[in-house]
Amino acid sequence: KAGVTQTPRYLIKTRGQQVTLSCSPISGHRSVSWYQQTPGQGLQFLFEYFSETQRNKGNFPGRFSGRQFSNSRSEMNVSTLELGDSALYLCATSHGGSQETQYFGPGTRLLVL
Amino acid sequence: GESVGLHLPTLSVQEGDNSIINCAYSNSASDYFIWYKQESGKGPQFIIDIRSNMDKRQGQRVTVLLNKTVKHLSLQIAATQPGDSAVYFCAESLDSSYKLIFGSGTRLLVRP
């Protein structure tokens, strides 16, 4: 069974631009969560989607948004990029029940210049 | 994965020795706990999990211990190998929250 895939793997943007990242879950997984990883803040939860609905949201500004499609693939968007948005963005997928193992993708490395 | 913390605590062990990585979690209401391993350039990899109605769970070469009284979690790795070198994160979750709260991580270095 294929693992979680994320595209692109690397991305360079400039301040003020916007970016869209994609996550394709493991087959059969309907929940997709997004995390931001930085050296200073560690791994922080952004939001989680299940059956095209956002079920939970972390403490990030409205510039960070996401969506999920009917095939469970998810995208996250960051608008008006800031230097501090440079990070590794990870998605994790599961079947969607509570206390279920979340499996992570390799991440998208975003650099904002 | 690279540098996930500029000042991560580091545990250095000799190959073949046992390793114990500790984690203090934040919320006494958390009822699900997971250990992940992250190697450079990769996403976190699931190692083992434990629910709050248990205090010990064993996997292949790994054991997780949960002490709810002091909100402490530990990961024991038996016969540590060079391939175990990575950053290890504990994570906690509250029932129905669907989100994981991660600790800051511990870097494990295995000396040959």
Image: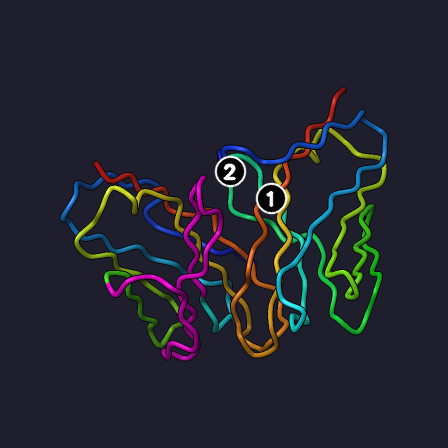
Chain of the residue that carries numbered disc 2 in the rendered image: B
Mark earlier in primary sequence (2, 1): 2
Give coordinates of residue A70: x percent, y percent: 35, 77
Q: Is residue A77 above or below residue B105?
A: below
Let me know if marks 2 and 1 both belong to one chain: yes
Q: CA distance from mark 2 to mark 1?
A: 8 Å
Q: Which residues are magenta?
A: A33-62
Viewer-closest of B28 and B21: B28
Would residue B9 appear left or right of A95 to someone viewing this image?
A: right
> How many other residues sit within 10 Å of disc 1, few (<14), some (14-19) or many (≥20)?
many
Magenta stretch: includes residue B104: no
Q: Quadrant of the C terminus of chain A?
A: top left
Q: Which residue is mark 1?
A: B105
Chain of the residue that carries numbered disc 1 in the rendered image: B
- Disc 2, disc 1: CB below 8 Å? yes
Circle 1: residue type:
Gly
Q: Which mark is residue B5?
A: 2
**Dominant secondary structure of the residues highlighted in magenta in the image:** strand
Q: Is residue A81 above or below residue A98?
A: above
Give coordinates of residue A78: x percent, y percent: 25, 56
| Mark 1 residue element | loop
Extreme residue toward the left, this view: A16
